[in-house]
Amino acid sequence: GAGVSQSPRYKVAKRGQDVALRCDPISGHVSLFWYQQALGQGPEFLTYFQNEAQLDKSGLPSDRFFAERPEGSVSTLKIQRTQQEDSAVYLCASSPSAYEQYFGPGTRLTVT
Amino acid sequence: GQNIDQPTEMTATEGAIVQINCTYQTSGFNGLFWYQQHAGEAPTFLSYNVLDGLEEKGRFSSFLSRSKGYSYLLLKELQMKDSASYLCAVRFEGGQNFVFGPGTRLSVLP
């Protein structure tokens, strides 16, 4: 079946612009995670959803970052007033259980 | 914080065996995962350990010692396609998120 998909794959934003990154998880997966991955580093946790409930948002770096999953399926990560330090790959992962996560290809965000 | 440590880079020869180590803070440990990530691609799941001992899956094996806060990923009969980053990730109690290490970039040479 289809894996996790993310769009856009690449996004260039001017500093100060707002961006919205989309994640389509594997159908039926209850859990959804967002991570930020800087070049040459491991992914860093941003936020976690169980169905439509955002149970953990402790990793969101500032109040400019906002995530939602209103119907318990597709999720959107929004970054307001982007800054250069927001440049990274944003990974989405979904999971049917506590044992493994299936990652999407990521969105590479470049803020100029 | 919950630090996960791995070597930054390793090099090995095709056909050889390589061991990638991972150490972590033991407090609240609730499972350890290894992922493979090729450049520009998403991480893919390799293995999961929650009890002490060795888990074998084909050419890949993963070992865990909970008391030592230590794991390793063993790759046998290395192939060129094994050149990738290998990420160690730990789940801690009280949360569903994983804490990832910085990754070990493995280069397999002919």
Image (cartoon, coloured by chain):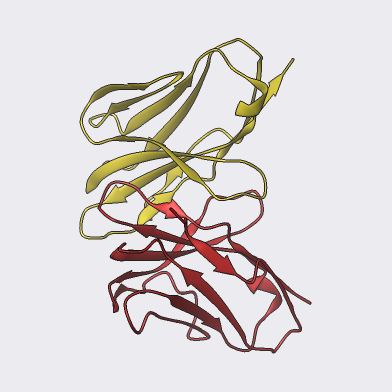
How many numbered markers are drawn?
0
Q: Give the vertical position of B14 relative to B37 (above or below).
A: above
Q: Which chain is yellow?
A: B
> What residue occupies the far right of the structure in this picture?
A112
Instruction: Residue A85: give x, y in percent of width and height.
Output: 66, 72
User: Looking at the image, which is closer to me, B45 or B64?
Assistant: B45
Q: Give the vertical position of B52 relative to A89 (above or below).
A: above
Res. B97 visible in picture: yes
Residue A17 falls in which quadrant of the image? Answer: bottom right
Q: Give the vertical position of A102 relative to B84 (above or below).
A: below
Residue at image location 46% in from the left, 69% down from the top: A24
| Residue B107 appears left or right of B42 | right
Residue at image location 62% in from the left, 58% down from the top: A38
For the C terminus of chain A, give its image quadrant: bottom right
Instruction: Residue B6: give x, y in percent of width and height.
Output: 50, 36
Residue at image location 23% in from the left, 30% down from the top: B67
Instruction: Residue B78: give x, y in percent of width and height.
Output: 59, 17
User: Looking at the image, which is closer to me, A84 or B2?
Assistant: A84
Residue at image location 58% in from the left, 57% down from the top: A105
Res. B27 visible in picture: no
Residue A16 falls in which quadrant of the image? Answer: bottom right
Q: Colour of chain A?
A: red
Instruction: Residue B55: give x, y in percent of width and height.
Output: 30, 23
Residue A88 falls in which quadrant of the image? Answer: bottom right
User: Looking at the image, which is closer to me, A21 or A25?
Assistant: A25
